[in-house]
Amino acid sequence: MSAVSPREYESPGASEMPHRNTVCIAGTPIDRLSRAEAVNKIDSFVKSRRFHQVATANTDFLVNALSDPELTHILRHSDMVTADGMPVVWAARLVGSYIPERVTGADIVPDIASLAAKRGYRLFMLGAQEATLHRAARRLELVAPGIKIVGRLAPPMADLDSLDTPRILAAIRAARPDILLVAFGNPKQEKWIYRNRAALGNVPVCMGVGGTFDFLAGDVRRAPLWMQHCGLEWFHRLALNPRRLWARYSRDFRQFSRAVREERLASARLITPGTQLNLTLTDDDGFEGGVAIHIKAVGPLTAATMRDLNRVAMQAATDFPADSARRITINLAGIGSADAEAAGSLLLLDASLRDMGIDIVLSDTPGALMTLMRLPVDINSPSLPHNAVQSTRLGSNRAGDPIRG
């Protein structure tokens, strides 16, 4: 690689690079999309003919991810994560951002079926009970006349490692779907998709849909529309099945509320005036056994300025030789402000670079920004002050936790 001389980049505002518009909530980048925009994005995924994983994250997803490094890794590497529930939409507002509306699996699957019928996309339904799956398929055929449901499979109930995955994958390959809907429940469905992403490479969209088939089949009644619009669907579900859901909902409320409260305080401590981000690139001569670039960021870190950091980092990544160890260090000591949208973009940048085989290190990171991103702190210093700084590698939820890939 040719040497990169020190140089400054002044942020021009909007970048020309494609950019996901997200907000980081409980350490997960949530896409700031309307229901129609989410469907359009799925359409573009199918047209690309490349594998994409889609998740709809409710509070239970996000709380599970707080203590499950593998699930955290998967959600951060997913191609779209929608806000499945009003509590997630409200949380975005509390940390200073905005999500247009909730995009639940139960709402978007009929929309996807209509899209599939219109475009001629092939749909495969995996999970639930056989009778439920049959009724859910009939419902989709009524909602979207002409839809091509090319496969239905209801595997016996089993834990993740006991599923007959070779048989399932063989059925999917034979059906050649464009869209695979997996109803194993969270986190089982997300883990199954991610662990089998290589075998599912010819399926452009793989999406976990939780209990959506039960709703479509009529096995479980959804809340009245007025309760859905007021964000009270969770209360309806609790009233229907208090014995099963009370403990889970209580845990989720406590942990999610605490996480959002911490992130709201962190957001307030990171807000200072500024509009321009300056980026300086230098070779990192201290990295032995490979090549490395050091990027120094000075100024505000927002959704708009993160586009420029993304562009510069990705350009540096493409300049690296492919046959050596590679690392990008981003120094954040000079950032004047940051927000939850920038935190989401940083996590996605990490995922993109790691997919390219590049190590990414954040240095001199303000403690408040680490709180927003749910980054690991030094193992001997679990309660880092908000005004402290820390160097860390991204990619896991807690220091030392392995990630299955």
Image: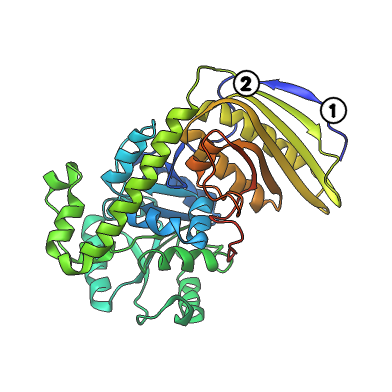
Residue at image mark 2: 11
**298 lies above or below 127:** above
> Could one spot residue 117 in this view of the protein?
no
Q: Earlier in the sequence, mark 2 or mark 1?
A: 1
Could you classify mark 2 by the number of other residues whose Cα lies within 10 Å: few (under 14), some (14-19), or many (20 or more)? some
SS for tag 1? loop
Q: Tell whether 283 sits left or right of 79.
A: right
- Measured as percent of width and height from the top left, residue 251 is found at 30, 58
Could you tell whether 246 is left or right of 125 in the image?
A: left
The amino acid beneath tag 2 is Ser
Residue at image location 16% in from the left, 65% down from the top: 242
Quote the CA–CA distance across marks 2 and 1. 19 Å
Q: Position of residue 257 (x, y in %)?
A: 32, 46
- Foreground pick, 103 / 178: 103
Task: Name the image quarter holding the C terminus.
Answer: bottom right
Density class for disc 1 (Cα within 10 Å; few <14, some 14-19, many ≥20) is few
Say above or below: 309 vs 150. above
Residue 281: percent from the left, percent from the top?
76, 30
Residue found 51% across the figure and 47% down from its top:
383
Q: Which mark is residue 5?
A: 1
- Indicate the secondary structure of the residue bearing disc 2: loop
- Where on the picture, by quarter, is residue 201? bottom right
Above/below status of 398 relative to 38 = below
Residue 87 as seen in the image, left or right of residue 346: left
Could you tell me if residue 334 is visible in this image? yes
> x, y (%) of residue 301?
56, 28
The residue lying at 50 percent from left, 50 percent from top is 79
Question: Which dot marks residue 307?
Answer: none
- Between 369 and 311, the residue placed more toward the observer is 369
Q: Looking at numbered disc 1 in the image, what kind of residue is underneath it?
A: Ser
